[in-house]
Image (cartoon, grey):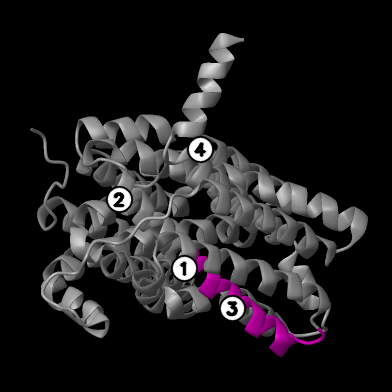
Amino acid sequence: MMGGGKVIRKIRNHPLVLPIYLPSFLGSMCGGLLIPVLPLYIISFNVSYGMVGLVLASHGIGMMMSDVPAGLILRRLGEKQSMLLGVALTTLSTLALYWAQNIPQAIVLRLISGFGIAIFGISRHTYITDVIALTNRGRAYALFGGLMRVGKFAGPAIGGFVAAIFGLRTVFLLFSVLYALIFIIVVTFLAKRDLPTFKSSSQPGNHLYLTIKRQSRVLLTAGVGQIFGQMIRSGVTVIIPLYAAEVLGLKVEAIGLIVSIAAAIDMSLFYPAGLLMDRRGRKHAILPCFFIQAVGLALIPFTYSFTSLLAIASLISFGNGLGPGTMLTLGSDLAPDDSRAEFLSLWRFIGDIGHTSAPLVVGAVAAIATLPVATWVVSATGLFAVVVFAFHVPETLKKH
């Protein structure tokens, strides 16, 4: 019993477990709830597949549009109030989908949800950067990334089960209840902190401009690497199901099995990856992460069966599993102490460019050439990321 009490006290006193990890896990699971539901919900309005894609993309578009303004809001409100604002916007906009009557309403609500997620995400990123020492950030962000992946892995099954029994729109109610719980957790456990004073300027409106001016070289070099890295990560999720269905002719249950096994491998490596970042350096995780994914993607056009594609998908997931939280960690390391909110908002915006553009690149290249060619193009982005991070971005783990 005494041992259990010590564990409870450690959890309660840990700066991240209750205020950040628990709400982030619940938020990721909520995002997973909507994966199997949203496409069917949109189709229920009797619209084209193109409109389905537009509504699904509106959430990401809202995030991209809001990344930089979210940093300005964070500077004005602080971490706790900004996080609560983001959670509230996401909760209310998703709840309103239950009563939405047409596609324009759904698009607006998903845009607002993207805005809320952007504020929520940047606030968490800044908070972790503030409270966790440089030498522990790798493990902190690797655990953060691992919990996010576990939540997103569990969410779709729960969402599909609830939708099958109670109806599609009921999932929006469940989402909102869980997000209301996130709001309560943040109110209760997140410490209120003031952001560091921005040097060289007393005018809030100049913060973003001065951050871009002072950090332009870092944002251009490391930012380009992040764009390429996020492109290959996002591209994998598009290419494997498409190649399995269109080229190999696999059925949906076989594709689902490949994706699930690969995801399990990915999720199992987050703690070793965190240790690697903190003990050997950030590049020891970043470089093999993107290189292994690039090699795996380049081999996909040579697969010919369920087994061979599963083997390559597992290799790619092993590579990605070496890098949970790497871009978050690198962004925290590079962020100046006095302008973290502005820098991290720009850093997130750059990453979202890569994440959002990958499906567009795959679709465009596959339409002009073939899907295997598109696969090799996305593979090349992983190699570009390796080159940028290896030769143009310094190691940010400073050992004393």
Q: Earlier in the sequence, mark 4 or mark 1?
A: 1
Task: Tell me the residue that label 4 is attached to.
Answer: 267
User: How far apart are the two marked residues, 2 and 1, measured between alpha carbons?
Assistant: 17 Å
Depth check: give the residue in front, 29 or 135: 135
Task: Tell me the residue that label 1 is attached to.
Answer: 119
Q: Secondary structure at mark 1?
A: helix
Please state, as top left, top right, bottom left or bottom right, where the C terminus lies in the image: top left
Q: Is residue 10 visible?
A: yes
User: How far apart are the two marked residues, 4 and 3, measured between alpha carbons?
Assistant: 30 Å
State yes or no: residue 118 in magenta: yes
Depth check: give the residue in front, 286 or 106: 106
Q: Position of residue 258 (x, y in %)?
A: 61, 43
Query: Which residue is depicted at the point 31% across and 50% down?
Result: 129
Crowding at dot 1, Cα within 10 Å, few <14 / some 14-19 / many 20+, comes out as many
User: How far apart are the two marked residues, 3 and 2, measured between alpha carbons?
Assistant: 27 Å
Task: Tell me the residue that label 2 is attached to.
Answer: 130
Number of numbered tags placed on the structure image: 4
Q: Earlier in the sequence, mark 4 or mark 2?
A: 2
